[in-house]
Image: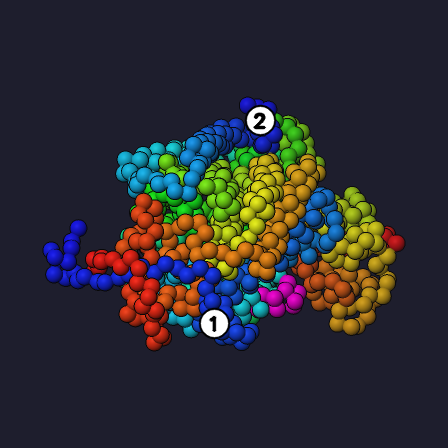
């Protein structure tokens, strides 16, 4: 059973995942029995009652109320079991334990940001302590996203106008995949992340070290720019090796002449790049669609300068 | 049973037998000539054929997009197109297949052709409205093409806000196109309901109409009640985009969850608008090829109506992880399980119909058996997804993609192909190559399973849908799926080829190639221009295979075909006295 489970389901790494898998297999195996049973009956009929001559006359059987009731009530009982079981499990997933550790999650096109109680911030990587309930309070800066961790069997949409929440308890340390499951635009499939489940003391160490917040001042501007390039998923649309993706490549961009879709030509200087980050559709490069999300209010000047410094290094 | 002697309200009617003419000289195809006669026709059969040609075109356009999507997914990163193009492709694939193929497929194409003939009517109740429906469909399709040419749409066929408000692609034009197509769907529904109520031949009581008719009746109710909500919702999206009225976009003070509620209020019944007509085809084919009375006529007929009623109360099962309240999720989950019951009843009744039948495994029945397996798998995985806790993990993954393809392609397209093969001799007067048809059916079945079974596994493993790039562990599943898609595509194209070929080189079809008791098989192939040269009189139900064929070929001569022509009095054979109200 466990081997079969491994083929069909990801490893169960939260306290509810195991219960989830039991229900998953209960419904699938009962369903399989029904499918095989009904098909066996049909195949038997087709062979047994195969037409041997065109003049064959069939008996008149117009129905049978006892049979109709039987095959209405038995499936009804079955689906009520599945309903009750699924509902019970769902309520378990919905009821957050009182001692849960709270992390704020922000979805934006196309990356995940995580804010911790002590001011620490991480992008793309959610750090949590093992063996302790964690509650995620989530909101979005732009469109609908969905926070999905297959190994925890958990998913919750993240909306721009409200807070939604999710809780889990991951007993084992490890790294688990985060997906965005609600389609959110061009870079949807790059909106990935990792849950890093650490031993409680390792988690505390990490938390203390990152107390500073968003801008990591230890890095040189160009290095910080590169970090932002990866963490905020700029890499989804902008290559650094000259290849054409959804957006123009950053290679050799700085100082070059750029042809715009309006027919004008501009020089890609600091002011132009700054504008393109906070008002991406103001000057769209010829041959590209105006699909870039708006980053106004998401980066401070320090971070935008870091990105410009990083672009300068790409020659 | 009342007789004319015992009940003064009943009167005796003289009827006579009309054996359908073989190889008729005059029929609906040659009644009028020229392209103009087709474009302005009021004949339900010709309008059905116009629909058939149009939906076939859009089926292959949508299919080509599916193949491009599958080809792109051969590798985990970019294979041959950009992410933005990929997103537009899956949006258009979904929109075209749903609005331009699946919704009109069985009702508007096959239903238009067959429904009036099965009722013993000369046409639908409102022939001009019927033509208007077609032109609204074509206009809507034209607007969709316009949207594609003005930059495409990248929102997914669901047009979820606020993304659909913010994207710079041609969402406004696209929603306008779907809005117009919606009216086509509503008008067809109105037309069919009126036709079924008012146009039935003498003796055609509610207990004698075909189950195909019942299924179209249930479908029409849903079309009329649900489609206006979609039209309003999409109009609101357009208003929000053009005039910045805050309804769904939180940046303007709106609520995106409201959009999801309104969208699924249409789009869940729409799923049944797509599948219920397919159920009707199953009942027709299964009785004909087992030469047997349907098991549980009323159970099947009423379960269609039950489905159309419950389908309005389950939309929230698309929103278990959306942020709607846990209470709402519980109620929607419960109601969703209930909709499985009438569907199950149908499956059991069909299987019971085969018992002690005289089963001949010809291609239409073969397609129905394909339907049986694929729809069962689609239905069972639907039960899985209806369970709230299970849906939390599987929602928006390839598991869901596989589930609805099993229902929509495995269920509906298989039923559509069964119906197309079943009625092809009646529609065209030609027989197709039966051996090739059986072979292709098996090929489609295999191709389909190779495409979509791996998607269940990768979905359960966590592969989200609408992903341009994916993590490498899923590559083997994607590659198998892509290979399957090409087999499937080749299968569909083969059907197209041999059916078109049969038009030119196919053998002439007899009036009743399958020995069916259905009324549509008691008229010549192809059908006469006004369906019946006499007013048909109905004594038996369409599944009374224990009664001799002559008793199904009855009519009143005195009215002619309604155009003042007189019927040849020499064909008065087997004159018979019956009782009718």
Outermost residue toward the right in this view: A315
Q: Nearer the viewer, residue B484 or B535?
A: B535
Drawn side of residue A135 relative to residue B15, left or right: right
Which residue: 54% across, 68% down?
B138
Q: Nearer the viewer, residue A139 or A191?
A: A191
Q: Is residue A46 above or below residue B441?
A: above
The residue indicated by pointer 2 is A4
Q: Is residue B364 above or below residue B528?
A: above
What chain does mark 1 sit on? B
Q: Nearer the viewer, residue A90 or B375?
A: B375
Please report the bounds of the magenta region as a residue range: B143-152
Q: Is residue B455 above or below residue B211?
A: above
Q: Position of residue B82 (x, y in %)?
A: 72, 54
Q: Position of residue B502 (x, y in %)?
A: 57, 56
Q: Is residue B236 visible?
A: no
Q: Nearer the viewer, mark 1 or mark 2?
A: 1
The residue indicated by pointer 1 is B31
Find out whether the residues at labels 1 and 2 contact each other: C-beta distance under 8 Å: no
Q: Quadrant of the N terminus of chain A?
A: top right
């Amino acid at each position: 059973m466990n081997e079969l489970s491994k083929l069909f389901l990801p490893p169960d790494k939260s306290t509810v995942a195991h219960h989830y898998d039991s229900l998953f297999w209960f419904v699938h195996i009962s369903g399989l029995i029904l499918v095989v049973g009904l098909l066996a009956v049909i195949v038997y009929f087709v062979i047994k009652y195969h037409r041997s001559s065109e003049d064959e006359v069939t008996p008149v059987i117009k129905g049978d109320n006892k049979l109709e009731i039987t095959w209405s009530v038995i499936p009804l009982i079955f689906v009520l079991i599945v309903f009750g079981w699924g509902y019970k499990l769902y309520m378990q997933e919905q009821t957050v334990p009182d001692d849960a550790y709270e992390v704020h999650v922000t979805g934006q096109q196309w990356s995940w940001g995580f804010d911790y109680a002590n001011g620490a911030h991480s992008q793309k990587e959610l750090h949590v302590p093992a063996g302790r309930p964690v509650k995620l309070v989530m909101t979005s800066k732009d469109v609908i996203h969905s926070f999905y961790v297959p190994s925890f069997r958990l998913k919750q949409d993240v909306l721009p106008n409200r807070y939604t929440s999710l809780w889990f308890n991951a007993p084992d340390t490890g790294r688990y995949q985060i997906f965005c499951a609600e389609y959110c635009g061009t870079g949807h499939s790059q909106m990935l992340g990792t849950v890093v489940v650490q031993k409680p003391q390792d988690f505390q160490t990490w938390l203390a070290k990152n107390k500073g917040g968003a801008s990591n001042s230890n890095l040189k501007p160009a290095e910080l720019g590169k970090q932002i390039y990866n963490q905020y998923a700029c890499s989804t649309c902008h290559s650094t090796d000259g290849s054409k993706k959804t957006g123009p490549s950053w290679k050799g961009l700085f100082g070059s002449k750029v042809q715009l879709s309006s027919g004008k030509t501009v020089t890609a200087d600091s002011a132009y790049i700054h504008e393109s980050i906070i008002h991406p559709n103001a000057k769209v490069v010829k041959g590209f669609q105006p699909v870039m999300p708006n980053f106004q209010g998401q980066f401070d000047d320090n971070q935008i300068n870091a990105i410009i410094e990083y672009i300068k290094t790409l020659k | 049973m009342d007789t004319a002697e015992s009940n003064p309200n009943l009167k005796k009617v003289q009827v006579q037998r009309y054996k359908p003419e073989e190889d008729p000289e005059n029929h609906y195809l040659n009644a009028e000539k020229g392209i103009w006669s087709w474009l302005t026709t009021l004949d339900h059969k010709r309008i059905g054929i116009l629909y058939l040609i149009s939906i076939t075109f859009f089926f292959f356009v949508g299919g080509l997009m599916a193949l491009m999507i599958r080809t792109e997914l051969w590798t985990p990163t970019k294979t041959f197109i950009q992410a933005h193009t990929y997103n537009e492709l899956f949006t258009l694939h979904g929109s075209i297949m749903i609005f331009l193929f699946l919704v009109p497929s069985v009702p508007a194409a096959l239903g238009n052709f067959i429904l009036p003939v099965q009722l013993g009517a000369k046409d639908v109740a409102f022939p001009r409205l019927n033509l208007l429906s077609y032109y609204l469909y074509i206009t809507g399709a034209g607007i969709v093409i316009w949207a594609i040419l003005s930059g495409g749409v990248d929102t997914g066929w669901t047009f979820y806000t606020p993304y659909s408000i913010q994207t710079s692609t041609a969402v406004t034009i696209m929603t306008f196109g779907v809005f117009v197509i919606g009216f086509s769907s509503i008008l067809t529904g109105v037309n069919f309901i009126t036709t079924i109520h008012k146009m039935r031949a003498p003796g055609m009581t509610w207990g004698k109409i075909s189950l195909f008719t019942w299924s179209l009746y249930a479908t029409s109710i849903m079309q009329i009640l649900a489609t206006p909500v979609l039209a309003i919702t999409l109009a609101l999206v357009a208003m929000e985009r053009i005039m910045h009225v805050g309804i769904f976009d939180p940046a303007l003070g709106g609520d995106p969850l409201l959009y999801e509620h309104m969208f699924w209020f249409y789009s869940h019944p729409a799923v049944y608008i797509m599948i219920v007509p397919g159920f009707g085809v199953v009942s027709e084919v299964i009785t004909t090829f087992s030469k047997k009375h349907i098991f549980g006529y009323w159970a099947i007929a009423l379960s269609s109506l039950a489905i159309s009623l419950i389908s309005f109360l389950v939309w929230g099962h698309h929103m278990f992880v959306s942020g709607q309240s846990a209470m709402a999720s519980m109620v929607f989950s419960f109601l969703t399980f209930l909709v499985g019951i009438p569907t199950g009843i149908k499956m059991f009744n069909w299987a019971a119909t085969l018992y002690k039948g005289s089963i001949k495994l010809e291609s239409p029945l073969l397609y129905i058996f394909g339907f049986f397996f694929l729809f069962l798998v689609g239905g069972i995985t639907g039960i899985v997804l209806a369970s709230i806790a299970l849906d939390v993990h599987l929602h928006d993954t390839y598991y869901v993609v596989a589930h609805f393809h099993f229902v929509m392609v495995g269920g509906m397209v298989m039923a559509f192909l069964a119906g197309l093969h079943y009625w092809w001799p009646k529609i065209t007067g030609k027989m197709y190559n039966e051996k090739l048809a059986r072979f292709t059916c098996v090929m489609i079945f295999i191709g389909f399973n190779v495409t979509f079974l791996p998607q269940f596994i990768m979905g359960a493993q966590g592969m989200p849908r609408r992903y341009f790039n994916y993590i490498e562990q899923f590559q083997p599943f994607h590659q198998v799926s892509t290979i399957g898609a090409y087999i499937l595509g080749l299968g569909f194209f083969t059907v197209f080829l041999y059916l078109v070929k049969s038009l030119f080189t196919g053998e002439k079809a007899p009036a009743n190639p399958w020995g069916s008791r259905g009324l549509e098989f008691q008229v010549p192939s192809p059908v006469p221009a006004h369906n019946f040269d006499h007013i048909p009189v109905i004594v038996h139900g369409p599944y009374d295979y224990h009664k001799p064929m002559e008793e199904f070929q009855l009519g009143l001569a005195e009215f002619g075909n309604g155009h003042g022509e007189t019927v040849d009095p020499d064909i008065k054979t087997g004159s018979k006295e019956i009782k009718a109200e």
